[in-house]
Amino acid sequence: MEKGTILLLKQAIFALTLFYIPFIKAQNTLPSQSAVLAKSFSIKDTLFKAPFIDVDEWRETPVKHRYVHGGFEGTNTRFSLYFPSKEQYQGRFFQYITPFPDNENLSQGAKGEDDKIGFSISSGAYFIETNGGGKVDFAKPSPSSDPSVGAYRANAASAQFSKVIANHIFGTHRTYGYCFGGSGGAYRTVGGIENTEGVWDGAVPYVLGSPMAIPNVFSVRMNAMRILNDKFPQIIDAMDAGGSGDMYSGLNEEEKQALTEATKLGFPPQSWFGYKTMGIHGFIALYQGVTMADRKYFDDFWKVKGHLGANPTESLLKARLQKTSTIKAIIAIDEAVKIGLKEPITEGERGSADLAWKSMGGTEGAMPVAYQLEDLMPNINFMGGDLVIKSGAAMGKTIQLAKLEGDKIVFGPVDPAVLAKIKVGDTVFIDNSNFLAMQTYHRHQVPGKEYKVWDQFRDTEGKPIYPQRPMILGPLFTRGAAGVLPTGKFNGKMILVCSLWDREAFAWQGDFYREKVKANLGEKTDDNFRLWYTDHALHGDLSKQEDPTRTVSYLGVLQQALRDLSAWVEKGVTPSPSTAYKIEDGQVIVPKMATDRKGIQPVVDLTIKGSKRADIKQGKTLTFIATVDVPTNSGKIIAADFDFDGSGKFSTSGKIVTKNSTTAEVKVKQTFTQKGTFFPTIRVASQREGDAKTAFTRIQNLDRVRVVVH
């Protein structure tokens, strides 16, 4: 090699060394100084007195950030921190609180609107996620000696130590902190802000339940699902655009009662469109806890007067399954996924408000998740049950069942130690009696009169009309999640985000917490609290929708709430007022116009010649007109897209014509060349700064009409 070439090579190596030495040093700075940082960390909670850092590195995805990982010695608590550059940082953090303690890295890998890391950094914040003290094993439910650790203490300690790290990286400064979480994470978010001081300056809990949500929101819906399974198509059609509006038409008395009961308890009738896929949701992880807490109920249900099982209807007897069989084959997870018995869960789903329950229990690796039996199971609407082992090494043990399909049975949360003892040839007994008993459990859990949706189960004197259990379980589950019952007393500011079509945290529960806050703050409520409802939104916080022509993501509302909360706390910028609403028979009803409804979501009204329905001949062209209203100071409409074939692709864009500061109009024509019934849908989005390119803070809503082509 020539001397000139060697010299150039040495110079290149030297230059690369100069480049990489600072990078390597930066990577090792925090772990090497972990002990020093720990000494400067002061916390009253002595359980978390010894923090450590084991990873400090720059990463390029989803956006460039400095990733710091660590935990607390003597505990299972681990945290992940994602810091922006100094140029991007604005002195705050956003901390996501998962529905239950799980893993500190669940937000990694998300893209677009779902990307919490990218959103936080684009908002001038660093992002925090923890494992909440360690993953919960739902296959072995047991009361914790101190649920406050997983509820908020692990999260609070991580947030407090993150401020020490932020001061080390960016220099000494006042660090503002905001926590947010949905579903069970909303309980934990509220529990955190109510029971700590100096940790968070504000909170955005979303899709929040009340202390009576669990297990009652699931029991009442399961009861309706069992009784109304064959009638849902006509119920959905009546409630859809251009429908009759009478969802009770054609139902018998038992069916009417089931639908009325669910509606008055808060289930939104429009959300029954998902009856085929929504299943029993998170109740799969609650079932064993309920049976442990109130075993006697499941015997009383079938024997004691006043319980449905003691005087069963024909439909209840038809749904009951008690069958003996023999295990023919053992099915592991890979095979179960391959044949369609189970769906794999993504990391994003594990940490989400709506689908986190999918990771509650189950088995990993080569452990079985299902069995094939010697004979077929009856064709019934099976929502869950028990598998009692009648022979072999596991005789006397019980496994929770989640699904029956042909000659195959799928487990719910299960103890692997029990599975290891079960072999091919063992005799088993399938029984769904307890699951059927759960479906009317809410009737025997009548709480105080502040829960007006339970008035349907009280007589004229206010006394329960059904036999009551000696213990109300809802508050116990709430304490397990939040550490304590919510009081409405907190330091800082809060924006609560709830969904009007929520099937798991019925919308009235947002108002229930608001009343707690009002009882505490009185006339100062509006100085510290907001409640924003999102129309056409469900429970889940993922951008992907089950049916995009019926519902929208509320992520844009959540993201704007976080930004507005930080501006409220740090700069005194007053956010948009709470959504205006009233509650009638368990349903939250909002005004039709955005200026009256308030909040921050646009309102859209799609019509065909002023109607919600058009009956036309094949080949005719229709003009669709949508009026879109945006609440005052909530930005402007940046997108208006149509779906005409029900695919959910929204491939036709309408021209947005601004009428005034809050109103726009969208027109589009469409020719219908095929016969059938169609539901043309418009989906609109507003954005505070009018930025049509950003993936974040896009506030969506939709509307649809019916077109029948003859």
Image: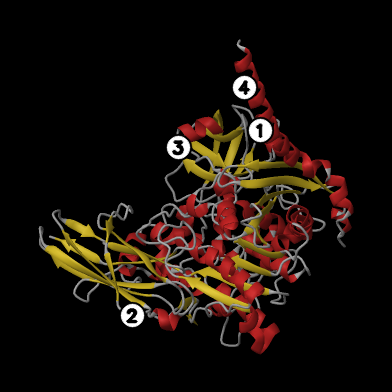
**Which residue was labeled with disc 1?**
391
Label 3 secondary element: loop
Does any portion of residue 36 appear in the rendered image? yes
Image location (x, y in percent) of residue 178: 66, 65
Label drawn at residue 660: 2
Q: How many neighbours does mark 3 have within 10 angstroms: few (below 14), some (14-19), or many (20 or more)?
A: few
C-alpha separation, residue under disc 2 versus residue under disc 4: 66 Å
Compared to residue 528, the image places residue 231 above or below, namely above
Image location (x, y in percent) of residue 477: 69, 62
Q: Give the amino acid type for the residue marked by disc 3 in the picture.
A: Gly
Image location (x, y in percent) of residue 240: 32, 67
**Which residue was labeled with disc 4?**
8
At a point 37% along the width and 61% down the height, the residue shown is: 550
Q: Are marks 2 and 1 in contact (CB under 8 Å)?
A: no
C-alpha separation, residue under disc 2 versus residue under disc 1: 75 Å
Q: Give the amino acid type for the residue marked by disc 1 in the picture.
A: Ser
Label 2 secondary element: loop
First reached walking from the N terminus: tag 2 or tag 1: 1
Q: How many neighbours does mark 4 have within 10 angstroms: few (below 14), some (14-19), or many (20 or more)?
A: few
Between 284 and 46, the residue placed more toward the observer is 46
Label drawn at residue 340: 3
Between 194 and 526, the residue placed more toward the observer is 526
